[in-house]
Amino acid sequence: MHVQVRDLSKHFGSFHAVKNVSFDIEKGHLIGLLGPSGGGKTSILRMLAGLESPDSGQISFHGRVVNDIPPQERGIGFVFQNYALFKHMTVYDNIAFGLKVKKVPKSKIKDKVMELVELTGLSGFERRYPHQLSGGQRQRVAFARALAPEPQLLLLDEPFAAIDAKIRQELRSWLRDLIERVGITSIFVTHDQDEAIEVADEIMIINEGRVEQKGTPWDIYKEPSTPFVATFIGESTMVEDASALKGFDAVGSGTQTRALIRPEYIEIGRDGDFPILSATEKGIVRHMHFRGSEWLIEIEVGGHKLVTYRSLEKETLQVGQEVRVLVHRAYLFNDTDNWIEENRLKVDPMPIII
Ligand SMILES: Nc1ncnc2c1ncn2[C@@H]1O[C@H](COP(=O)(O)OP(=O)(O)OP(=O)(O)O)[C@@H](O)[C@H]1O
Ligand SMILES: [Mg+2]
């Protein structure tokens, strides 16, 4: 189902929770909503589902305005963070619930439930009660129950938030597969960047009731359209005055220009590693965090703490060690503009041989 939202607005009392939000979702796409707590993500989902009515704006499914259509007629499946299953019902009955309400014939219900049990990997668990399942299994029952009435749109509000990291990782790829197989248009809310990046076709960053940016995860990382997005996505360091950095001293004459430094914009080494030493800064290694597949290193440069990654294959650094730091690129912004700039003093890096 194609979803179109135009100028959606919502107040709770005098508080403006959702501010003129507009977006489209292509049929069959999975879109991730990402943003700080209180930004308005759940409020947007609730309006789509018809559980909350907007002050103004339009919601259309398949080109048909649904603002006045009651929730049960919108064809929506919902999975929440702690989607309470019916405790006194078996897995089978939980999944069958929506179909029984709709008075679907018993034999059809059986076929549908068995199909979903298979699809969600719950075969053999049909007669169990929720308390006899793990958290991940329970959440899969919640998915099956939401999918049973064959909704056209699936709304997922932090469905894995209460599940531990390892199982969560498994559920992510399971969800991706499931949604691809069923081909259902879906919206997935999460606090977890990695989760959004891994699961979604497109990401929408929501902050203070507005859409800050919408695009593929890679586009958003590569070309953040606002300083908020730049700092929110990926690990990075903000330097309040870009001209304090070697090679960026000529930028933004007049207005204050801030620089956001991504980990991959930084190279560290010894004096002899850099052909143009004047493009580099002196730094001191302050912290080293072992990340399993690499080091995350914090380096202090002229009072700023820069963060970068280092391969395990390279010489291991020591906390307190002096190093040379080349900031070869920065994401710059002032009050009116934002852009990416290269360090003007560095020589071109070695060609990358693939
Ligand atoms: N029924 C309500 N009455 C009053 N204020 C509300 C109501 N529902 C939400 N809000 C407020 O609207 C704002 C947006 O809330 P919402 O639940 O949409 O945020 P969210 O992005 O889902 O946050 P989180 O990531 O913490 O779940 C918050 O400031 C919240 O306190
Ligand atoms: Mg929420």
Image: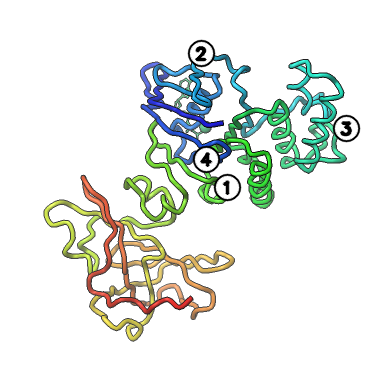
Callout 3: 10 Å neighbours few (<14), some, many (20+)? few
**Looking at the image, which residue is at 83% across and 34% down?**
114
Mark nearer the N terminus (4 vs 1): 4
Q: Nearer the viewer, mark 1 or mark 3?
A: 1
Residue 131 lies left or right of residue 54; in this view the side is right
Give SS at disc 3.
Answer: loop
Give the left or right position of residue 208, taking residue 316 as reference.
left
* Left or right: 199 as drawn, with respect to 127: left
What percent of the width, then of the height, locates residue 73?
Answer: 61, 17
Q: Residues within 10 Å of mark 2 (few under 14, many from 20)?
A: few
Frontmost residue, 91 versus 56:
56
The answer to which of marks 1 and 3 sits earlier in the sequence is: 3
**Residue depicted at 85% across the width and 34% down the height:** 126
CA gap, disc 2 to disc 4? 24 Å
Residue tagged 1: 199
Q: Mark 3 or mark 2, which has the lower sequence index?
A: 2
- Residue 243 at x, y percent in the picture: 20, 62
- Which disc is residue 31 wearing? 4
Q: Amino acid at mark 4?
A: Ile
Q: Secondary structure at mark 2?
A: loop
Residue drawn where x is 26% and y is 80% of the image:
277
Please give the residue where the numbered disc 3 appears in the rendered image: 127
Task: Measure the C-alpha gap from mark 1 to mark 2.
Answer: 32 Å
- On the image, numbered disc 2 is attached to which residue? 68
At mark 1, the secondary structure is helix
Ligand 1 under 8 Å from disc 4 Cβ: no
Disc 3 to disc 4, C-alpha distance: 34 Å
Q: Earlier in the sequence, mark 2 or mark 4?
A: 4
Question: What is the basis of the colouring in this image?
Answer: rainbow
Q: Work out whether 243 lies above or below 154.
A: below
